[in-house]
Image (cartoon, helix red, strand yellow):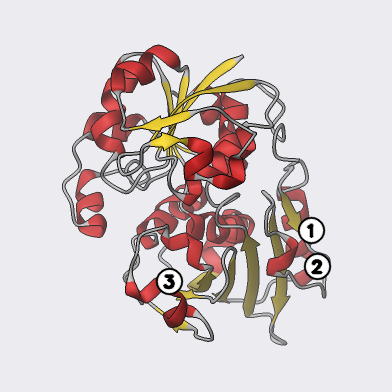
Amino acid sequence: MIKIGIVGISGYSGLSTLEILLNHPNVRVMYVSANNTRGKLNDIWPRLKSRTKLFCDRYNSEIAIKECDCLFLAVPHTVSMMITPQLIKAGKRVIDLSGDYRLDRVSEFKRWYHSAHQDGRNLKKAVYGLPELYRADIQKAQLIANPGCFPTAAILGLAPVAAMYADQIQSIIIDAKSGVSGAGKKATLGFSYCEVNENFKAYRVLNHQHTPEIDLYLSQLSGTKMTVHFVPHLLPVSRGILETIYVQLSSNISPGKLMTQYKRFYKTEPFVRVMDAGQQVELKNVQNSNYCDISLAFSPDKRLLVITSVIDNLLKGAAGQAVQNMNIMYDIEENTGLK
């Protein structure tokens, strides 16, 4: 039985991680913490009443190290890097749901997160936790950088065409829409009910911190430098991400051939579903699941590929993918707890 700790249990990603793990046959959640909340967990989250007797307190590294084999860090950016070094030194496995270990250079982190990185040593050791591309590395990892929600949908949507046709890609525009839970629980005017309801808006246009993450891992996959133009939007829904991705090609590609490439690329992946020609994905079909659904369409001249990729931002975009990574790390059937 794997002994688990969750740091940041008061947030949506922390709660989602716990709810999955409470039904996981191979783990036992031993420890939860949050720096802004203290008390019985089923009082903090009434939906957990009768499901757990866990008590939440401020983070204590000594207790976490003593009680746990593996810890999920569902904390704000820049917090993980302050507590991860001690956990790694103690031999614990860490799955970080923040952005602290997703980029490969401290300079890039500072540029996009506007804060100096405090743990460059472990930044170089972290494995990017996208199972469909890095499964072999995840199996051996001690520290997992769980991908961002927007990059998960973008990279999975683009991976097959980037892997096979990188030299024919002229430009990539990602038009992304996210539910409000992607912003977390913080009380901010822009995410309040009256501001979001019956509204739709773009934000951080061409300046979102997930942009370099998408660029980095698409470039690694394709073996050539790739740059995307990324524009996020806020949907008036609680959860889910839908990305419409426009790929301009230098020459036409056979739709049938590309569809075969996508089907082959994800044939053995338990959580990626490629739609048949003419089918379109929908947000409601992946909400509350760990699936990523992908559809393809071409312009008449076959020079513009339109990819639509959809996930639940709290599951495949956060907690579900984190548990998927844990299963891989501990050689457990990958969909355990996520079916």
Q: CA distance from mark 3 to mark 2?
A: 27 Å
Q: Secondary structure at mark 3?
A: strand
Q: Nearer the viewer, residue 278 or 55?
A: 55
Type of the residue with mark 1: Thr
Identify the residue at image location x=72%, y=27%. 333
Q: Please give left or right for residue 88 compared with residue 163 in the image.
A: left
Q: Is residue 16 above or below residue 219?
A: above
Q: Secondary structure at mark 2?
A: helix
Is disc 1 in contact with disc 2, using a CB cutoff of under 8 Å? yes
Q: Is residue 151 above or below residue 321?
A: below
Task: Give the residue at mark 2.
Answer: 256
Using the rendered view, name the quadrant where residue 277 is placed: bottom right
Q: CA distance from mark 3 to mark 1?
A: 27 Å
Type of the residue with mark 3: Phe
Identify the residue at image location x=35%, y=29%. 125
Q: Position of residue 262 (x, y in %)?
A: 72, 57
Q: Which mark is residue 230?
A: 3
Q: Position of residue 325 (x, y in %)?
A: 57, 34
Mark 3 neighbour class, 10 Å CA radius: few under 14, some 14 to 19, many 20 or more? many
Mark 1 neighbour class, 10 Å CA radius: few under 14, some 14 to 19, many 20 or more? few
One can see residue 133 in this view:
no
Q: Please give left or right for residue 179 compared with residue 62 in the image.
A: right
Q: Which mark is residue 260?
A: 1
Q: Position of residue 223 (x, y in %)?
A: 47, 50
Identify the residue at image location x=41%, y=73%. 192
Q: Which mark is residue 189?
A: none
Image quarter where the N terminus lies is top right
